[in-house]
Image (cartoon, helix red, strand yellow):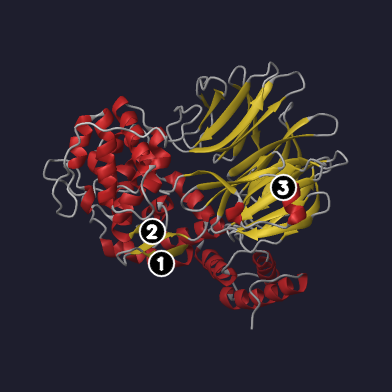
Amino acid sequence: MLDLDPKTHDDRRVLADDLHTYLDLTLDTHYPPERVRDIAEQIARYTDSGVFLVAALYADHLLTSTGGDTAPPPGSITEVFELHRATLARTDFWIDPVLTVLGHARGQGMPLDLLHAAALAHQPPDPGQPTPQLTDTKRALAKAAFYLRTAPDAEQRLLYRYFHQALTDHTAPLTDPAVLYSALLAIVPSAVDGGRDWEHAPPYLLHHIAEHAATAGNGAVDHLLEDPSFLVHADPDILVPHLPDATTERAVLHARIYRAAVARLPKGHATATRRFLLAWYAGRQRPSLARAIAAVPLNGQPPLAVPLWTTQHEARRVPAYVHSRTGHTQWVRAVSSILLPDGTPLAITASSDRSMIVWNLSTGAHRPVITGHRGEVNGVAGAVLPDGTPVAVTASYDRTAIVWDLETGIPRHTLTGHKDVVRAVSGARLADGTPVAVTASYDKTAIVWDLETGTPRHTLTGHCGEVNGVAGAVLPDGTPVAVTASYDKTAIVWDLETGTPRHTLTGHGEWLSAVAYTPLPDGTPLAVTTGHDKTVIVWDLATGRKMWSSQLHDTGLSIAAVPAGFLIGRGPDIQCFLWTDLEGLLARGWPEPSSGQRICSYSAE
Protein backbone atom coordinates (compact mmCIF):
# COMPACT_ATOMS: atom_id res chain seq x y z
CA MET A 1 0.00 0.00 0.00
CA LEU A 2 1.33 3.44 -0.96
CA ASP A 3 0.63 6.60 1.05
CA LEU A 4 -0.03 9.23 -1.64
CA ASP A 5 -0.80 11.98 0.89
CA PRO A 6 2.38 12.19 3.00
CA LYS A 7 2.09 14.17 6.21
CA THR A 8 5.47 13.66 7.87
CA HIS A 9 9.09 13.68 6.77
CA ASP A 10 9.21 9.88 7.01
CA ASP A 11 6.07 9.56 4.86
CA ARG A 12 7.65 11.76 2.21
CA ARG A 13 10.89 9.77 2.33
CA VAL A 14 8.94 6.52 1.77
CA LEU A 15 7.07 8.09 -1.12
CA ALA A 16 10.39 9.25 -2.60
CA ASP A 17 11.69 5.66 -2.34
CA ASP A 18 8.63 4.32 -4.18
CA LEU A 19 8.98 6.99 -6.85
CA HIS A 20 12.66 6.18 -7.19
CA THR A 21 11.84 2.51 -7.82
CA TYR A 22 9.22 3.43 -10.41
CA LEU A 23 11.44 5.94 -12.22
CA ASP A 24 14.43 3.62 -12.17
CA LEU A 25 12.38 1.00 -14.03
CA THR A 26 10.88 3.55 -16.41
CA LEU A 27 14.06 5.42 -17.31
CA ASP A 28 16.14 2.19 -17.36
CA THR A 29 19.79 3.08 -18.14
CA HIS A 30 19.13 6.47 -19.71
CA TYR A 31 19.96 8.38 -16.50
CA PRO A 32 22.48 7.71 -13.70
CA PRO A 33 21.03 6.45 -10.38
CA GLU A 34 21.90 9.62 -8.46
CA ARG A 35 20.02 11.74 -11.02
CA VAL A 36 16.98 9.43 -10.84
CA ARG A 37 17.01 9.69 -7.03
CA ASP A 38 17.18 13.48 -7.18
CA ILE A 39 14.20 13.57 -9.56
CA ALA A 40 12.21 11.27 -7.26
CA GLU A 41 12.86 13.47 -4.22
CA GLN A 42 11.83 16.60 -6.09
CA ILE A 43 8.58 15.06 -7.30
CA ALA A 44 7.86 13.69 -3.80
CA ARG A 45 7.56 17.29 -2.65
CA TYR A 46 4.66 17.76 -5.08
CA THR A 47 1.55 18.13 -2.89
CA ASP A 48 -1.37 18.11 -5.33
CA SER A 49 -3.13 14.94 -6.48
CA GLY A 50 -1.64 12.46 -8.97
CA VAL A 51 2.00 12.27 -7.87
CA PHE A 52 2.67 9.07 -9.87
CA LEU A 53 1.02 10.61 -12.92
CA VAL A 54 3.47 13.50 -12.50
CA ALA A 55 6.31 11.01 -12.41
CA ALA A 56 5.04 9.19 -15.51
CA LEU A 57 4.60 12.44 -17.43
CA TYR A 58 8.03 13.68 -16.49
CA ALA A 59 9.67 10.36 -17.39
CA ASP A 60 7.99 10.49 -20.81
CA HIS A 61 9.22 14.05 -21.20
CA LEU A 62 12.80 13.01 -20.44
CA LEU A 63 12.69 10.02 -22.81
CA THR A 64 11.21 11.96 -25.73
CA SER A 65 13.25 15.18 -25.36
CA THR A 66 16.29 15.57 -27.56
CA GLY A 67 19.50 17.49 -27.28
CA GLY A 68 19.33 17.81 -23.52
CA ASP A 69 16.42 20.25 -23.78
CA THR A 70 14.52 19.08 -20.73
CA ALA A 71 12.37 20.90 -18.19
CA PRO A 72 12.88 20.56 -14.43
CA PRO A 73 10.48 18.32 -12.48
CA PRO A 74 7.08 20.03 -12.19
CA GLY A 75 6.14 21.56 -8.85
CA SER A 76 2.61 22.90 -9.37
CA ILE A 77 -0.59 21.83 -11.06
CA THR A 78 -0.04 24.32 -13.89
CA GLU A 79 3.48 23.02 -14.53
CA VAL A 80 2.15 19.45 -14.64
CA PHE A 81 -0.58 20.57 -17.00
CA GLU A 82 1.83 22.31 -19.36
CA LEU A 83 4.17 19.32 -19.42
CA HIS A 84 1.32 16.91 -20.15
CA ARG A 85 -0.30 19.25 -22.67
CA ALA A 86 2.95 19.53 -24.63
CA THR A 87 3.29 15.74 -24.64
CA LEU A 88 -0.27 15.21 -25.89
CA ALA A 89 0.01 17.97 -28.48
CA ARG A 90 2.92 16.22 -30.18
CA THR A 91 0.50 13.58 -31.47
CA ASP A 92 -2.79 15.52 -31.46
CA PHE A 93 -2.77 19.14 -32.66
CA TRP A 94 -6.40 19.60 -31.51
CA ILE A 95 -5.42 19.28 -27.84
CA ASP A 96 -4.22 22.90 -27.57
CA PRO A 97 -7.34 24.67 -28.89
CA VAL A 98 -9.72 22.54 -26.80
CA LEU A 99 -7.83 22.91 -23.53
CA THR A 100 -7.32 26.63 -24.12
CA VAL A 101 -11.00 27.52 -24.58
CA LEU A 102 -11.98 25.25 -21.69
CA GLY A 103 -10.57 27.91 -19.38
CA HIS A 104 -13.63 30.04 -20.19
CA ALA A 105 -16.20 27.44 -19.11
CA ARG A 106 -18.57 28.95 -16.53
CA GLY A 107 -20.66 27.47 -13.75
CA GLN A 108 -20.73 23.67 -13.75
CA GLY A 109 -19.04 23.62 -17.15
CA MET A 110 -19.57 23.91 -20.90
CA PRO A 111 -21.18 21.18 -23.06
CA LEU A 112 -19.25 19.37 -25.76
CA ASP A 113 -20.85 21.04 -28.79
CA LEU A 114 -20.20 24.55 -27.47
CA LEU A 115 -16.61 23.71 -26.58
CA HIS A 116 -16.15 22.37 -30.10
CA ALA A 117 -17.52 25.56 -31.68
CA ALA A 118 -15.35 27.72 -29.40
CA ALA A 119 -12.21 25.73 -30.24
CA LEU A 120 -12.89 26.06 -33.98
CA ALA A 121 -13.26 29.83 -33.56
CA HIS A 122 -10.09 30.04 -31.49
CA GLN A 123 -8.05 28.07 -34.05
CA PRO A 124 -9.76 27.74 -37.46
CA PRO A 125 -8.31 25.02 -39.71
CA ASP A 126 -5.74 26.11 -42.28
CA PRO A 127 -6.91 26.33 -45.91
CA GLY A 128 -7.00 22.89 -47.47
CA GLN A 129 -6.84 21.13 -44.09
CA PRO A 130 -9.70 18.99 -42.77
CA THR A 131 -11.97 20.58 -40.18
CA PRO A 132 -11.84 18.88 -36.75
CA GLN A 133 -15.07 17.11 -35.90
CA LEU A 134 -17.02 16.77 -32.66
CA THR A 135 -15.43 13.35 -32.12
CA ASP A 136 -11.99 14.98 -32.23
CA THR A 137 -12.97 17.37 -29.45
CA LYS A 138 -14.41 14.53 -27.39
CA ARG A 139 -11.19 12.57 -27.87
CA ALA A 140 -9.08 15.56 -26.78
CA LEU A 141 -11.14 15.94 -23.61
CA ALA A 142 -10.80 12.23 -22.86
CA LYS A 143 -7.01 12.47 -23.12
CA ALA A 144 -6.99 15.35 -20.62
CA ALA A 145 -9.58 13.78 -18.29
CA PHE A 146 -7.22 14.00 -15.31
CA TYR A 147 -7.61 17.81 -15.25
CA LEU A 148 -11.38 17.91 -15.78
CA ARG A 149 -14.49 17.86 -13.69
CA THR A 150 -17.70 16.74 -15.38
CA ALA A 151 -21.36 16.97 -14.39
CA PRO A 152 -24.65 16.42 -16.24
CA ASP A 153 -26.98 19.35 -16.89
CA ALA A 154 -30.78 19.23 -16.57
CA GLU A 155 -30.98 17.54 -19.98
CA GLN A 156 -28.30 15.00 -18.97
CA ARG A 157 -25.72 16.47 -21.29
CA LEU A 158 -22.19 16.25 -19.93
CA LEU A 159 -20.60 19.55 -18.88
CA TYR A 160 -16.82 20.04 -18.78
CA ARG A 161 -14.61 22.37 -16.74
CA TYR A 162 -11.21 22.31 -15.06
CA PHE A 163 -11.12 20.75 -11.60
CA HIS A 164 -8.71 23.41 -10.30
CA GLN A 165 -9.09 27.20 -10.41
CA ALA A 166 -5.38 27.57 -11.13
CA LEU A 167 -5.88 25.81 -14.48
CA THR A 168 -8.74 28.16 -15.36
CA ASP A 169 -6.62 31.19 -14.45
CA HIS A 170 -3.72 29.75 -16.43
CA THR A 171 -5.58 29.06 -19.70
CA ALA A 172 -8.27 31.77 -19.83
CA PRO A 173 -5.90 34.63 -20.85
CA LEU A 174 -4.82 32.61 -23.93
CA THR A 175 -8.20 33.06 -25.68
CA ASP A 176 -9.65 36.23 -27.20
CA PRO A 177 -12.91 36.65 -25.23
CA ALA A 178 -14.55 38.53 -28.12
CA VAL A 179 -13.86 35.65 -30.53
CA LEU A 180 -15.22 33.15 -28.02
CA TYR A 181 -18.36 35.23 -27.40
CA SER A 182 -19.08 35.57 -31.13
CA ALA A 183 -18.71 31.80 -31.61
CA LEU A 184 -21.13 31.05 -28.76
CA LEU A 185 -23.63 33.65 -29.92
CA ALA A 186 -23.64 32.16 -33.41
CA ILE A 187 -24.99 28.90 -31.95
CA VAL A 188 -28.29 30.53 -30.94
CA PRO A 189 -30.90 29.65 -33.61
CA SER A 190 -32.41 32.35 -35.80
CA ALA A 191 -35.99 33.44 -35.20
CA VAL A 192 -38.61 33.99 -37.92
CA ASP A 193 -38.19 37.77 -37.61
CA GLY A 194 -34.44 37.53 -38.20
CA GLY A 195 -33.49 37.94 -34.56
CA ARG A 196 -32.24 35.26 -32.20
CA ASP A 197 -34.52 32.51 -30.95
CA TRP A 198 -33.49 32.47 -27.29
CA GLU A 199 -36.35 30.14 -26.39
CA HIS A 200 -34.46 27.31 -28.10
CA ALA A 201 -30.93 28.38 -27.16
CA PRO A 202 -28.72 25.85 -25.31
CA PRO A 203 -29.27 26.05 -21.53
CA TYR A 204 -25.62 26.92 -21.00
CA LEU A 205 -26.03 30.12 -23.02
CA LEU A 206 -29.21 31.15 -21.19
CA HIS A 207 -27.29 30.82 -17.95
CA HIS A 208 -23.87 32.19 -18.89
CA ILE A 209 -23.82 34.17 -22.15
CA ALA A 210 -24.04 37.43 -20.14
CA GLU A 211 -20.77 36.52 -18.39
CA HIS A 212 -19.08 35.89 -21.72
CA ALA A 213 -20.47 39.16 -23.06
CA ALA A 214 -19.08 41.10 -20.09
CA THR A 215 -15.66 39.54 -20.65
CA ALA A 216 -15.80 40.26 -24.40
CA GLY A 217 -16.61 43.94 -23.89
CA ASN A 218 -17.13 46.23 -26.89
CA GLY A 219 -20.85 46.68 -26.21
CA ALA A 220 -21.67 42.96 -26.09
CA VAL A 221 -23.75 43.36 -22.92
CA ASP A 222 -25.63 46.28 -24.52
CA HIS A 223 -26.48 44.06 -27.48
CA LEU A 224 -27.99 41.41 -25.20
CA LEU A 225 -29.94 43.87 -23.08
CA GLU A 226 -31.48 45.43 -26.16
CA ASP A 227 -32.92 42.03 -27.23
CA PRO A 228 -36.44 41.51 -25.70
CA SER A 229 -36.30 37.75 -26.27
CA PHE A 230 -33.05 37.50 -24.32
CA LEU A 231 -34.51 39.49 -21.41
CA VAL A 232 -37.39 37.01 -21.18
CA HIS A 233 -35.37 33.78 -21.40
CA ALA A 234 -32.01 34.61 -19.74
CA ASP A 235 -31.17 33.49 -16.22
CA PRO A 236 -31.80 36.51 -13.93
CA ASP A 237 -29.32 35.30 -11.29
CA ILE A 238 -26.47 35.62 -13.79
CA LEU A 239 -27.75 38.62 -15.74
CA VAL A 240 -28.48 40.99 -12.83
CA PRO A 241 -24.81 41.44 -11.80
CA HIS A 242 -24.05 42.62 -15.34
CA LEU A 243 -26.81 45.22 -15.61
CA PRO A 244 -24.38 47.99 -14.54
CA ASP A 245 -22.31 47.13 -17.65
CA ALA A 246 -24.96 48.76 -19.86
CA THR A 247 -23.65 51.85 -21.68
CA THR A 248 -26.08 52.82 -24.44
CA GLU A 249 -29.17 54.82 -23.55
CA ARG A 250 -31.47 52.02 -24.66
CA ALA A 251 -29.56 49.29 -22.79
CA VAL A 252 -29.42 51.39 -19.61
CA LEU A 253 -33.20 51.89 -19.69
CA HIS A 254 -33.79 48.17 -20.33
CA ALA A 255 -31.46 47.34 -17.43
CA ARG A 256 -33.43 49.64 -15.12
CA ILE A 257 -36.70 48.01 -16.15
CA TYR A 258 -35.23 44.52 -15.80
CA ARG A 259 -33.86 45.22 -12.32
CA ALA A 260 -37.25 46.50 -11.13
CA ALA A 261 -39.11 43.51 -12.56
CA VAL A 262 -36.85 40.71 -11.28
CA ALA A 263 -36.83 42.23 -7.78
CA ARG A 264 -40.47 41.11 -7.48
CA LEU A 265 -39.98 37.60 -8.89
CA PRO A 266 -40.66 34.71 -6.50
CA LYS A 267 -38.07 32.00 -6.03
CA GLY A 268 -38.42 29.21 -8.59
CA HIS A 269 -40.67 31.30 -10.82
CA ALA A 270 -41.70 30.25 -14.32
CA THR A 271 -40.46 32.06 -17.43
CA ALA A 272 -44.07 33.12 -18.13
CA THR A 273 -44.10 35.03 -14.83
CA ARG A 274 -40.89 36.81 -15.79
CA ARG A 275 -42.31 37.77 -19.18
CA PHE A 276 -45.44 39.16 -17.55
CA LEU A 277 -43.56 41.31 -15.03
CA LEU A 278 -41.10 42.57 -17.64
CA ALA A 279 -43.95 43.68 -19.89
CA TRP A 280 -45.73 45.26 -16.92
CA TYR A 281 -42.73 47.34 -15.83
CA ALA A 282 -41.79 48.22 -19.42
CA GLY A 283 -45.27 49.66 -19.91
CA ARG A 284 -44.38 52.52 -17.56
CA GLN A 285 -41.24 53.69 -19.36
CA ARG A 286 -41.00 52.17 -22.85
CA PRO A 287 -44.30 50.96 -24.37
CA SER A 288 -42.47 49.69 -27.46
CA LEU A 289 -40.42 47.34 -25.27
CA ALA A 290 -43.60 46.21 -23.49
CA ARG A 291 -45.12 45.26 -26.84
CA ALA A 292 -41.97 43.43 -27.93
CA ILE A 293 -41.76 41.46 -24.66
CA ALA A 294 -45.46 40.58 -24.82
CA ALA A 295 -44.89 39.12 -28.29
CA VAL A 296 -41.86 36.98 -27.35
CA PRO A 297 -42.71 33.31 -28.17
CA LEU A 298 -43.01 31.09 -25.13
CA ASN A 299 -43.95 27.38 -25.25
CA GLY A 300 -46.60 28.02 -27.89
CA GLN A 301 -48.56 30.33 -25.56
CA PRO A 302 -50.46 33.24 -27.10
CA PRO A 303 -48.88 36.71 -26.83
CA LEU A 304 -49.58 38.68 -23.68
CA ALA A 305 -52.09 41.48 -23.59
CA VAL A 306 -50.00 44.65 -23.94
CA PRO A 307 -50.28 47.02 -20.95
CA LEU A 308 -51.23 50.53 -22.05
CA TRP A 309 -49.92 51.99 -18.78
CA THR A 310 -48.96 50.73 -15.34
CA THR A 311 -48.48 52.01 -11.83
CA GLN A 312 -45.61 51.35 -9.45
CA HIS A 313 -46.07 50.72 -5.74
CA GLU A 314 -43.88 53.12 -3.76
CA ALA A 315 -43.85 50.80 -0.76
CA ARG A 316 -41.41 48.45 -2.42
CA ARG A 317 -38.65 50.39 -4.03
CA VAL A 318 -35.70 48.64 -5.61
CA PRO A 319 -32.52 49.48 -3.64
CA ALA A 320 -30.28 51.94 -5.44
CA TYR A 321 -26.53 52.42 -5.48
CA VAL A 322 -24.90 55.54 -4.03
CA HIS A 323 -22.94 55.72 -7.26
CA SER A 324 -22.97 53.40 -10.26
CA ARG A 325 -20.34 54.16 -12.87
CA THR A 326 -18.75 52.35 -15.78
CA GLY A 327 -15.19 52.69 -16.99
CA HIS A 328 -13.71 49.23 -17.27
CA THR A 329 -14.49 47.11 -20.30
CA GLN A 330 -14.08 43.71 -18.59
CA TRP A 331 -14.40 42.12 -15.14
CA VAL A 332 -13.38 44.20 -12.13
CA ARG A 333 -11.07 41.82 -10.24
CA ALA A 334 -10.17 43.83 -7.13
CA VAL A 335 -10.82 47.10 -5.33
CA SER A 336 -8.98 49.05 -2.65
CA SER A 337 -9.59 52.36 -0.92
CA ILE A 338 -7.35 55.18 0.27
CA LEU A 339 -7.84 58.51 2.05
CA LEU A 340 -5.83 61.38 0.58
CA PRO A 341 -4.03 63.83 2.90
CA ASP A 342 -6.77 66.40 2.17
CA GLY A 343 -9.45 63.94 3.30
CA THR A 344 -10.70 62.93 -0.18
CA PRO A 345 -11.78 59.26 -0.20
CA LEU A 346 -10.68 57.31 -3.28
CA ALA A 347 -11.42 53.83 -4.55
CA ILE A 348 -9.00 52.04 -6.90
CA THR A 349 -10.33 49.28 -9.14
CA ALA A 350 -8.29 46.66 -11.01
CA SER A 351 -9.69 44.89 -14.05
CA SER A 352 -9.25 42.05 -16.51
CA ASP A 353 -9.02 44.77 -19.18
CA ARG A 354 -5.42 45.33 -17.92
CA SER A 355 -6.21 48.73 -16.45
CA MET A 356 -6.66 50.53 -13.13
CA ILE A 357 -9.15 53.33 -12.46
CA VAL A 358 -9.10 55.80 -9.55
CA TRP A 359 -12.58 56.90 -8.40
CA ASN A 360 -13.65 59.80 -6.17
CA LEU A 361 -16.03 58.18 -3.67
CA SER A 362 -17.68 61.49 -2.85
CA THR A 363 -18.70 62.31 -6.43
CA GLY A 364 -18.52 58.97 -8.27
CA ALA A 365 -16.30 60.57 -10.93
CA HIS A 366 -13.12 58.87 -12.07
CA ARG A 367 -9.75 59.99 -13.36
CA PRO A 368 -8.37 58.87 -16.74
CA VAL A 369 -7.90 55.11 -17.05
CA ILE A 370 -4.36 54.00 -16.12
CA THR A 371 -2.74 51.28 -18.22
CA GLY A 372 0.66 49.65 -18.28
CA HIS A 373 0.30 45.94 -17.53
CA ARG A 374 0.50 43.35 -20.32
CA GLY A 375 -1.89 40.97 -18.54
CA GLU A 376 -5.08 41.07 -16.50
CA VAL A 377 -4.83 43.12 -13.31
CA ASN A 378 -6.23 41.10 -10.44
CA GLY A 379 -5.03 42.80 -7.26
CA VAL A 380 -4.60 46.34 -5.97
CA ALA A 381 -3.61 48.03 -2.71
CA GLY A 382 -3.40 51.72 -1.81
CA ALA A 383 -0.71 53.37 0.34
CA VAL A 384 0.70 56.78 1.25
CA LEU A 385 4.47 57.38 1.12
CA PRO A 386 6.24 59.29 3.92
CA ASP A 387 6.29 62.47 1.81
CA GLY A 388 2.49 62.30 1.49
CA THR A 389 2.40 60.94 -2.07
CA PRO A 390 -0.56 58.56 -2.56
CA VAL A 391 0.34 55.41 -4.49
CA ALA A 392 -1.32 52.21 -5.60
CA VAL A 393 0.28 48.82 -6.19
CA THR A 394 -1.27 46.56 -8.83
CA ALA A 395 -0.71 42.81 -9.26
CA SER A 396 -1.01 41.21 -12.68
CA TYR A 397 -1.04 38.02 -14.72
CA ASP A 398 2.04 39.40 -16.51
CA ARG A 399 4.07 38.31 -13.42
CA THR A 400 4.78 41.89 -12.29
CA ALA A 401 3.44 44.45 -9.86
CA ILE A 402 3.57 48.19 -10.52
CA VAL A 403 3.72 51.07 -8.04
CA TRP A 404 1.69 54.01 -9.41
CA ASP A 405 1.75 57.67 -8.38
CA LEU A 406 -1.98 58.41 -7.97
CA GLU A 407 -1.48 62.14 -8.42
CA THR A 408 0.11 61.80 -11.86
CA GLY A 409 -0.97 58.31 -12.98
CA ILE A 410 2.68 57.55 -13.78
CA PRO A 411 4.43 54.36 -12.63
CA ARG A 412 7.18 54.87 -10.03
CA HIS A 413 8.48 51.30 -9.94
CA THR A 414 7.88 48.01 -11.76
CA LEU A 415 8.34 45.15 -9.32
CA THR A 416 9.82 42.11 -11.06
CA GLY A 417 10.85 38.96 -9.25
CA HIS A 418 7.98 36.51 -9.41
CA LYS A 419 8.12 33.61 -11.87
CA ASP A 420 4.36 33.15 -12.28
CA VAL A 421 1.08 35.05 -12.01
CA VAL A 422 1.02 37.70 -9.27
CA ARG A 423 -2.39 36.94 -7.78
CA ALA A 424 -2.79 39.41 -4.89
CA VAL A 425 -1.18 42.34 -3.09
CA SER A 426 -1.54 43.97 0.32
CA GLY A 427 0.02 47.02 1.93
CA ALA A 428 1.74 47.25 5.32
CA ARG A 429 4.09 49.51 7.27
CA LEU A 430 7.25 48.44 9.09
CA ALA A 431 8.07 49.51 12.63
CA ASP A 432 10.21 52.43 11.40
CA GLY A 433 7.36 53.70 9.20
CA THR A 434 8.65 52.28 5.90
CA PRO A 435 5.69 51.51 3.63
CA VAL A 436 5.87 48.05 2.04
CA ALA A 437 3.74 45.92 -0.23
CA VAL A 438 3.46 42.14 -0.07
CA THR A 439 2.73 40.35 -3.35
CA ALA A 440 1.40 36.78 -3.53
CA SER A 441 2.13 34.60 -6.55
CA TYR A 442 1.36 31.28 -8.17
CA ASP A 443 5.13 30.61 -8.00
CA LYS A 444 4.42 29.60 -4.35
CA THR A 445 6.13 32.65 -2.86
CA ALA A 446 5.33 36.10 -1.54
CA ILE A 447 7.71 39.07 -1.78
CA VAL A 448 7.97 42.07 0.55
CA TRP A 449 8.75 45.26 -1.41
CA ASP A 450 9.96 48.68 -0.23
CA LEU A 451 7.49 51.08 -1.87
CA GLU A 452 9.86 54.04 -1.76
CA THR A 453 12.72 52.31 -3.58
CA GLY A 454 10.89 49.51 -5.41
CA THR A 455 13.38 46.95 -4.12
CA PRO A 456 12.58 43.57 -2.51
CA ARG A 457 13.30 43.21 1.21
CA HIS A 458 12.32 39.56 1.69
CA THR A 459 11.12 36.59 -0.37
CA LEU A 460 8.73 34.53 1.73
CA THR A 461 9.09 30.82 0.92
CA GLY A 462 7.29 28.04 2.76
CA HIS A 463 4.10 27.23 0.89
CA CYS A 464 3.90 24.03 -1.17
CA GLY A 465 1.16 25.38 -3.47
CA GLU A 466 0.21 28.53 -5.31
CA VAL A 467 -0.22 31.59 -3.07
CA ASN A 468 -3.43 33.38 -4.01
CA GLY A 469 -4.22 35.69 -1.10
CA VAL A 470 -2.44 38.04 1.30
CA ALA A 471 -3.40 40.46 4.06
CA GLY A 472 -1.22 42.83 6.09
CA ALA A 473 -1.70 43.08 9.87
CA VAL A 474 -0.13 44.41 13.09
CA LEU A 475 0.38 42.40 16.29
CA PRO A 476 -0.27 43.93 19.74
CA ASP A 477 3.49 44.48 20.27
CA GLY A 478 3.66 46.51 17.07
CA THR A 479 5.22 43.78 14.92
CA PRO A 480 4.04 44.08 11.31
CA VAL A 481 3.00 40.75 9.81
CA ALA A 482 1.38 39.40 6.67
CA VAL A 483 -0.91 36.39 6.29
CA THR A 484 -0.72 34.43 3.04
CA ALA A 485 -3.37 31.97 1.81
CA SER A 486 -2.47 29.09 -0.46
CA TYR A 487 -3.67 26.20 -2.55
CA ASP A 488 -1.71 23.96 -0.15
CA LYS A 489 -4.67 24.27 2.31
CA THR A 490 -2.72 26.44 4.77
CA ALA A 491 -2.17 30.07 5.69
CA ILE A 492 1.16 31.34 7.05
CA VAL A 493 1.76 34.33 9.34
CA TRP A 494 5.04 36.07 8.38
CA ASP A 495 7.15 38.57 10.34
CA LEU A 496 7.68 41.38 7.84
CA GLU A 497 10.73 42.74 9.67
CA THR A 498 12.67 39.47 9.37
CA GLY A 499 10.88 37.64 6.54
CA THR A 500 10.45 34.55 8.71
CA PRO A 501 7.27 32.55 9.43
CA ARG A 502 5.72 32.89 12.91
CA HIS A 503 2.79 30.47 12.56
CA THR A 504 1.40 28.01 10.00
CA LEU A 505 -2.41 27.97 10.20
CA THR A 506 -3.81 24.52 9.39
CA GLY A 507 -7.46 23.56 9.56
CA HIS A 508 -8.95 23.82 6.08
CA GLY A 509 -9.64 20.64 4.13
CA GLU A 510 -9.33 22.24 0.68
CA TRP A 511 -7.44 25.14 -0.90
CA LEU A 512 -7.93 28.60 0.55
CA SER A 513 -9.66 31.25 -1.55
CA ALA A 514 -9.36 34.41 0.57
CA VAL A 515 -7.92 35.96 3.74
CA ALA A 516 -8.61 39.21 5.58
CA TYR A 517 -7.37 40.95 8.75
CA THR A 518 -9.72 42.48 11.30
CA PRO A 519 -8.69 43.59 14.82
CA LEU A 520 -11.04 43.43 17.79
CA PRO A 521 -11.69 46.59 19.84
CA ASP A 522 -9.30 45.28 22.53
CA GLY A 523 -6.52 45.04 19.93
CA THR A 524 -6.61 41.27 19.40
CA PRO A 525 -5.43 40.75 15.80
CA LEU A 526 -7.65 38.31 13.94
CA ALA A 527 -7.41 36.78 10.48
CA VAL A 528 -10.41 35.28 8.72
CA THR A 529 -9.87 32.62 6.05
CA THR A 530 -12.30 30.86 3.78
CA GLY A 531 -11.77 28.16 1.23
CA HIS A 532 -13.09 25.60 -1.19
CA ASP A 533 -14.09 23.38 1.76
CA LYS A 534 -17.02 25.77 2.49
CA THR A 535 -15.47 26.63 5.86
CA VAL A 536 -14.73 29.99 7.48
CA ILE A 537 -12.08 30.08 10.22
CA VAL A 538 -11.12 32.90 12.59
CA TRP A 539 -7.50 32.90 13.83
CA ASP A 540 -5.62 34.78 16.56
CA LEU A 541 -2.54 36.07 14.70
CA ALA A 542 -0.54 36.64 17.89
CA THR A 543 -0.73 32.98 18.92
CA GLY A 544 -1.64 31.20 15.68
CA ARG A 545 -4.58 29.66 17.53
CA LYS A 546 -7.84 28.81 15.77
CA MET A 547 -10.51 30.83 17.58
CA TRP A 548 -13.51 29.25 15.90
CA SER A 549 -14.74 27.81 12.62
CA SER A 550 -18.07 27.24 10.94
CA GLN A 551 -19.44 25.70 7.78
CA LEU A 552 -20.87 27.88 5.06
CA HIS A 553 -23.64 26.58 2.83
CA ASP A 554 -21.40 27.16 -0.17
CA THR A 555 -17.83 28.00 -1.10
CA GLY A 556 -16.56 31.30 0.31
CA LEU A 557 -15.36 33.39 -2.61
CA SER A 558 -13.96 36.51 -0.97
CA ILE A 559 -13.60 38.28 2.37
CA ALA A 560 -13.54 41.94 3.31
CA ALA A 561 -12.85 43.29 6.78
CA VAL A 562 -15.15 45.76 8.52
CA PRO A 563 -14.74 47.21 12.04
CA ALA A 564 -14.83 44.27 14.49
CA GLY A 565 -16.31 42.01 11.84
CA PHE A 566 -16.09 40.73 8.31
CA LEU A 567 -18.04 40.36 5.08
CA ILE A 568 -18.09 37.15 3.01
CA GLY A 569 -19.18 36.79 -0.60
CA ARG A 570 -20.18 33.20 -1.23
CA GLY A 571 -21.95 30.73 -3.47
CA PRO A 572 -23.10 30.62 -7.09
CA ASP A 573 -25.84 33.17 -6.39
CA ILE A 574 -23.26 35.76 -5.28
CA GLN A 575 -24.70 36.55 -1.87
CA CYS A 576 -22.90 38.77 0.62
CA PHE A 577 -23.21 38.15 4.35
CA LEU A 578 -21.98 40.50 7.07
CA TRP A 579 -20.95 39.59 10.61
CA THR A 580 -20.43 42.40 13.14
CA ASP A 581 -19.67 42.40 16.89
CA LEU A 582 -17.12 39.65 16.29
CA GLU A 583 -15.86 39.97 19.88
CA GLY A 584 -19.32 39.18 21.24
CA LEU A 585 -19.87 36.34 18.79
CA LEU A 586 -16.65 34.62 19.82
CA ALA A 587 -17.54 34.99 23.50
CA ARG A 588 -21.10 33.65 23.08
CA GLY A 589 -20.35 30.95 20.52
CA TRP A 590 -20.29 30.97 16.74
CA PRO A 591 -23.58 31.53 14.88
CA GLU A 592 -24.85 29.67 11.89
CA PRO A 593 -23.87 31.42 8.63
CA SER A 594 -27.53 32.24 8.02
CA SER A 595 -27.50 34.43 11.14
CA GLY A 596 -25.17 36.85 9.41
CA GLN A 597 -26.99 39.81 7.94
CA ARG A 598 -27.45 39.34 4.19
CA ILE A 599 -26.69 42.85 2.99
CA CYS A 600 -26.84 42.14 -0.72
CA SER A 601 -27.78 39.28 -2.99
CA TYR A 602 -27.92 38.71 -6.72
CA SER A 603 -30.25 35.74 -6.39
CA ALA A 604 -33.85 35.92 -7.62
CA GLU A 605 -35.12 35.94 -4.02
Q: Quadrant of residue 43?
A: bottom right
The residue mark sitting in front, 1 or 3, is 3
Q: Quadrant of the N terminus?
A: bottom right
Q: Relative to 72, is 107 on the left or the right?
A: left
Q: Count residues near mark 3 (Cα–Cα under 10 Å), then give few for <14, some for 14-19, many for 20+.
A: many
Q: Gap between marks 1 and 3, in whole Å? A: 49 Å
Q: Give whichever of 33, 113 is nearer the camera.
A: 113
For label 2, the SS is helix
Q: CA distance from mark 2 to mark 1?
A: 8 Å
Say which amino acid is labelled 2: Ile
The 10 Å Cα crowd at callout 1, few under 14, some 14 to 19, many 20 or more, is: some
Dot 3 corresponds to which residue?
Answer: 582
Label 1 element class: helix
Query: Residue at the location (34% across, 66% down)?
Result: 139
Residue 116 in the image, given as x and y percentages of width and height: 30, 56
The extreme right residue here reads: 477
The residue beneath circle 2 is 95
Going 57% across and 24% down the picture, which residue do you hit?
A: 361
Left or right of residue 140, residue 171 in this image: right
- Front residue of 107/351: it is 107
Q: Earlier in the sequence, mark 3 or mark 2?
A: 2
On screen, 281 above or below 7?
above
Q: Is residue 66 visible?
A: no
Residue 421 percent across, percent down from the top left: 58, 44
Q: Quadrant of residue 517?
A: top right
Q: Nearer the viewer, residue 68 or 42?
A: 42
* Location of residue 345 with respect to 152 vertically, above or below: above
Q: Earlier in the sequence, mark 2 or mark 1?
A: 2
Q: Position of residue 70 (x, y in %)?
A: 56, 58
Per the rendering, the mark at residue 143 is 1
Query: Is the Cβ of the residue at disc 2 closer than 8 Å to that at disc 1?
Result: yes
